[in-house]
Image (cartoon, helix red, strand yellow):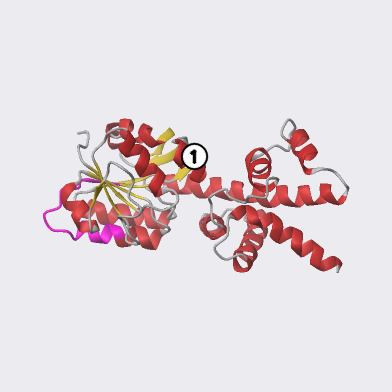
Amino acid sequence: MKPEKLGFVGLGQMGAPMAKNIAKKGLDLSVFDKAGTRERAPDNTSIVDSISALAKCCDTIFLSVPDGEASLSVISEIITTNDRRVTVVIDLSTVGPAAAREGNIQCKEVGITYMDAPVSGGQAGAEAGTISIMMAGDRDTKSEHDEILHAFAKNPFYVGNEPGQGQALKILNNFLSGTAMIASTEAILYGLSQNLEMQTMLNVLNVSTGQNTATSDKFPNRILTETFDAGFATALITKDVNLFIENAMNAGISTNVADTVGRIWNEANDALPDSDFTLVFKHLRDQIKATKT
């Protein structure tokens, strides 16, 4: 059955624009953010004062929170709400496979369907409604929500019937994204040391085999311009790479490359608190300058 009333928890850099795009389609959406709902709520949404209030008035609740601990905390509040109406929880957060599986177990015990549905595309993609969703769980539930998903995502993929599979795909995607950023930074810094211009390198790389998301988007739009505003935190890419390493090791997969990438991101995160992840370019460039002085 298609949901009539929707709820959204978490109105941060990703959550706010996703909720805004849902509301723009004229869908009935109530929102909550523990950091302050009124100042973050998109137009044409209803403001509620608690997660329990959402659970009592909504059929489906979307989550967009920072990590697994936050997600499970929200789920705990939902499932312990008396007289709840909610029957589906769609978790758009990157929480890791273990937290998604645990969320599914807790929801299932009280008759709520949990959908593991992390997103990719960054803040710009969330604002434009062009993000991808990697949804795992009950296929029929996904189908019932397709119209809503298309309101804020260009590519709502169904990736499997087991919650946790969406997270696995998301963290491997972000490991590749984080690797591309580090590898491209080192490559560009080498080119600059040989008196090549950054724009020239990007022009060539982006029609050659070295092309990747860092060279095609982050460098020309965020680094060359020195705006460093991709809208994705260094802390979050570090968290996701660490999740990939942990889960790959648990699966018996080699993490030789990931260990090196993870070390660099952890060092960058320690050095650059509250930063955009494109600032890793300046961080690594400054390290080189320091070794030459």
Magenta extent? 74-89
Residue 164 at x, y percent in the picture: 40, 49
Query: Where on the picture, by quarter, is residue 138?
Result: top left
Determine the residue located farthest toward the left in the rendered image.
83
Residue at image position (39%, 42%) is: 18
- Can residue 156 be seen here? The reply is no
Classify residue 90 as left or right of residue 197.
left
Closest to the observer, 96 or 185: 185
Picture layout, residue 126 above or below residue 11 = above
Residue 83 among those drawn in magenta: yes
Residue 259 at x, y percent in the picture: 64, 60
Residue kind at label 1, given as amino acid type: Gly
Q: Quadrant of the N terminus?
A: top left
Residue at image position (82%, 50%) is: 190
Residue at image position (82%, 67%) is: 291
Q: Quadrant of the C terminus?
A: bottom right
Say which element carries label 1: helix
**Badge 1 local density, few (<14 within 10 Å), some, or many (20+)?**
many
- Tag 1 residue: 125
- Can residue 14 be seen here? The reply is yes
Residue 149 among those drawn in magenta: no
Picture layout, residue 79 above or below residue 212 = below
Classify residue 190 as left or right of residue 221.
right
Classify residue 235 as left or right of residue 209.
left
Residue at image position (69%, 54%) is: 281
Closest to the observer, 106 or 290: 290
Q: How many marks?
A: 1
